[in-house]
Image (tube, helix red, strand yellow):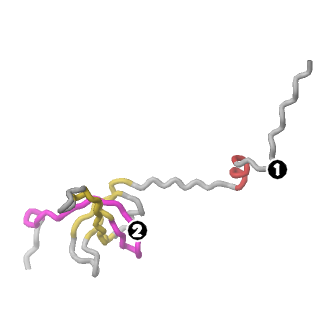
Amino acid sequence: MSTATSSQRAQRKTLIGFVASRSGDKSIKVTIAYKTPHPRYHKVVNRQTVLHVHDEKNEAKVGDKVEVMETRPMSRLKRWRIVNVIERAVVAAVAISEQDVAESVPTKLVQPQPAPAPQA
């Protein structure tokens, strides 16, 4: 059995897509979107491919843009693994208290006081 060095091995496919879901401990689904013309009507149609990807380090979250590489079969469906996370998803989770909501929403109980009339 010979060992394959990097100069002898063929270049593996790499694709860029977005993490659609996390299922299990080290498994994610990556969606690769592309456009292709319809064979008969020649209208450009949006298509997508879903890849089952192995995420060894649990580094990718839903919405992240990732680069994946073809690899040996990891399970029945997983034939890809993450190379790196290109762009993190923007997550703005800000806790809002009841007091903040009460101050911003006018209610019937709180009415603005009329300004006093000037004395002449």
Q: Position of residue 10 (x, y in %)?
A: 11, 65
- In percent of the image, x 10 and y 73: which residue is there? 3
Label 2 packing within 10 angstroms: few (<14), some (14-19), many (20+): some
Q: Nearer the viewer, residue 56 or 118?
A: 118
Q: What amino acid does circle 2 point to?
A: Ser
Residue occupying the far front of the picture: 41
Disc 1 is placed on an element classified as loop
- Return the x and y of residue 73 as percentages of the image width and height: 23, 77
Whether residue 83 can be seen here: no
Q: Name the residue that disc number 2 marks.
A: 21
Residues tagged 1 and 2 counted as in contact (Cβ below 8 A): no
Image-quadrant location for residue 74: bottom left
- Residue at image point 74% right, 47% down: 106
Q: Is residue 78 above or below residue 95?
A: below
- Mark sitting earlier along the chain (1/2): 2
**Left or right of 94 in this view: 2:** left
Q: Secondary structure at mark 2?
A: strand
Q: Position of residue 71 (x, y in %)?
A: 21, 71
**Of 94 and 83, the residue lying toward us:** 94
Residue density around tag 1, few if under 14, some if 14–19, many if 20 or more, within 10 Å: few
Q: Tell me the tag on residue 109.
A: 1
Q: Quadrant of the C terminus?
A: top right
> Of all residues shown, which one is farthest toward the top?
120
Q: Is residue 26 above or below residue 41?
A: below
Against 104, is 43 above or below? below
Name the side, left or right, on which 119 lies relative to 107: right
Residue at horizontal 83 percent and vertical 38 percent from the top: 113
